[in-house]
Image (cartoon, helix red, strand yellow):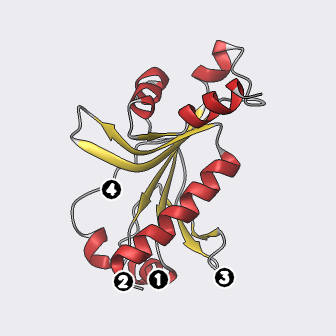
């Protein structure tokens, strides 16, 4: 696979993971007045995913995912935004191993790689210790809503048709 195909394949696996694990998620989320962009952000309120209680929203968690297809992509200077409660680098196993061997794995980031059948992402290296989030829940939710590929639209449409 070439770099474009790898990125598309990894991104599809992230989408699949987010659809199964997040109440609300968005792709290409801009932060800091469009100075930074995160490939994917997932949000889950605390408890049972119930939006009825404001405290559950305020204590929710954000998962940031950055997809890297190659060492050149990793070193490009773009998209290493590890500012969520949980941060994930999504890449091929070979790149993860190379980053590990060269001691280049980011701190406070878990690495996810595709399984052999490319049907799911599996934890490969763990570096997660504590949240690095400094932005408020409302700021991050707003940036997700404003993203080009927010999944709230799909959920609202589905609710209207029920």
Image quarter in which the N terminus is found: bottom left
Residue highlighted by disc 2: 2
- Along the polypeptide, which appears first: circle 1 or circle 4? 4
CB atoms of marks 2 and 3 within 8 Å: no
Q: What whole-number distance in Å separates the C-alpha atoms at marks 1 and 3?
A: 19 Å
Q: What whole-number distance in Å separates the C-alpha atoms at marks 1 and 4?
A: 18 Å
Residue 78 spot, x, y in % from top left: 25, 58
- Along the polypeptide, which appears first: circle 3 or circle 4? 4
Task: Looking at the picture, tell me which residue is in the foreground, 85 or 26.
Answer: 26
Residue 45 spot, x, y in % from top left: 65, 29
Relative horizontal placement of residue 121, taking residue 139 as reference (left or right): right
Image quarter in which the C terminus is found: top right
- Along the polypeptide, which appears first: circle 1 or circle 3? 1
CB atoms of marks 2 and 4 within 8 Å: no
- Along the polypeptide, which appears first: circle 2 or circle 4? 2
Residue 116 spot, x, y in % from top left: 64, 84
Residue highlighted by disc 4: 80
Residue highlighted by disc 3: 117
159 vs 25: above or below: above
């Amino acid at each position: 696979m070439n770099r474009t195909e790898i990125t598309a394949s990894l991104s599809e696996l992230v989408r699949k993971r987010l659809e199964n694990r997040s109440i609300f998620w968005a792709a290409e989320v801009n932060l800091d007045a469009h100075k930074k962009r995160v490939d994917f952000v997932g949000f889950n309120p605390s408890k049972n995913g119930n939006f009825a209680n404001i405290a559950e929203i305020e204590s929710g968690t954000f998962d940031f995912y950055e997809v890297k297809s190659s060492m050149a992509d990793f070193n490009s200077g773009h998209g290493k935004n590890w500012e969520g409660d949980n941060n994930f680098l999504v890449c091929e196993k070979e790149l993860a191993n190379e980053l590990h061997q060269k001691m280049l794995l980011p701190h406070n980031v878990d690495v996810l790689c595709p399984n052999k059948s490319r049907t799911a992402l599996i934890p490969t290296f763990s570096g997660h210790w504590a949240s690095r989030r400094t932005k408020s829940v409302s700021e991050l939710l707003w940036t997700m809503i404003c993203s080009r590929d927010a999944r709230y639209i799909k959920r609202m449409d589905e609710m209207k048709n029920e």
